[in-house]
Image: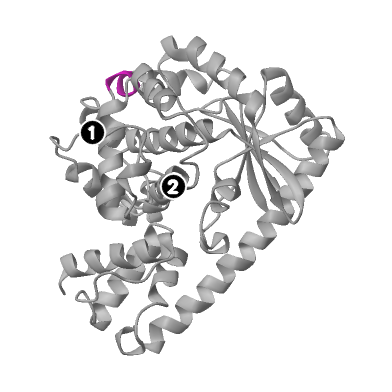
Amino acid sequence: MNENRVLSAFFELLRSGLWDRSLQRLDYFPLSRAEWQKLYDLSVNHTVEGVIFDGLQRLDLSLLPGRDLLVPWAVRIEKIEQRNKWMDKVINEQVHFFNSHEISPILLKGQGLSNLYPNPLRRICGDIDWCFESKAVYDKARKVVEEKGIDVNRSAGYSENYMWDNCEVEHHQKMFDIHNPFMKGYINRFEKNENKKKSAIYLNNIETLIPSPIATLLQVNLHILKHLLSFGIGIRQLCDSARAYFALYSKYDKASLYSLYKAIGIVKWVNLLHIILVDHFGLSEDVLPFPLNRQVEYKWMLSDILEAGNFGFFHESYANKENEVGHRVDSGSRIFSNLTKYFKVAPKEAISFPVMHFISRFSH
């Protein structure tokens, strides 16, 4: 098996699906049965099998995988689309519920980002994430949910979670995953100002609030960094970043976003992210908020992402053992290793992350 060719074919199909365009390189194909299986497994591990499937449909029949793989793949895609439609209904139910209690939740990530894709139903959805304008509203939201007889569990990261109609829902006090305590006032002022500029999407003609364009970009990228500092992140989250940069290009001030990155101390890390998005995801450099600095090595970060899979659940070094015991293994050493690596490109966040994450377990 030629693993380099599999990876090249994977990104070629990903770019095709992500940008709704024809395939640029056909010399990676055909693949052997084993290579197609490897590509499929990689797609599933990174929860981008829907986007990859869109690219797959642009291949000539002679280059497609066999029916033994193609048919179950197509069935999986149909289930992804069904789940997305179901989740839209759950979101609408919750919007109606919260609005009836004079609460206006803000939808983070998820369906708010799928709306930026050429084929929203092909983006795999996870849980529902709500943010609230203040601690008082956050507390009120928990109270009205509990009054319905639903158990709400507190978790680290100033968040809470519960099940609503068999769908996992999370409430967040904070819109942004920033751990440096010295940035709290700065970010609170920014968030308060951006709350006046909230956007909205319409799911089945029902309005759902989402963050402003610049807040969306900051939130998406900080979410990626947060998970890289812990157990890892998947390709899907980088697809979200690429689509957000493209779709929101004319809707925010580039200099302001660069200033935010600089104030938080993550310009070096964001530059690495941008290079990966341009070179491997097909994002146009023209839509970025600042020019690329290519005098850096970035492939170590791409390797990190590819190895870990979706939120680190598919890292080959740990996946089998975690499946056996049912929880994360070697957490301390894994996080320490990641903090050490990312200290050089995001030092303030790398230093603050473990401390603030621990404190957040006891602060609600």
Q: Where in the figure is residue 354, as x and y percent of width and height?
A: 37, 23
297 left or right, relative to 134? left
Q: Which residues are magenta?
A: 347-351
Q: Residue at x 71, y 43 (%)?
A: 208
Q: Residue 37 versus residue 222: which sits nearer the camera?
A: 222
Q: Residue 59 versus residue 253: which sits nearer the camera?
A: 253
Q: Residue at x 67, y 62 (%)?
A: 85
Q: Residues within 10 Å of mark 2 (few under 14, many from 20)?
A: some
* Label 1 vs label 2, nearer the camera: 2
The amino acid marked with disc number 1 is: Ser
- N-terminal-most mark, 1 or 2: 2
Identify the disc placed on residue 337. Answer: 1
Residue closest to the far right: 100
The residue pinned by badge 2 equals: 246
Determine the main secondary structure of the stretch shown in magenta: helix
Q: Residue 166 versus residue 244: which sits nearer the camera?
A: 244
Relative to 352, say whether 65 is above or below: below
In the rendered image, residue 132 lying in the magenta stretch gets the answer no
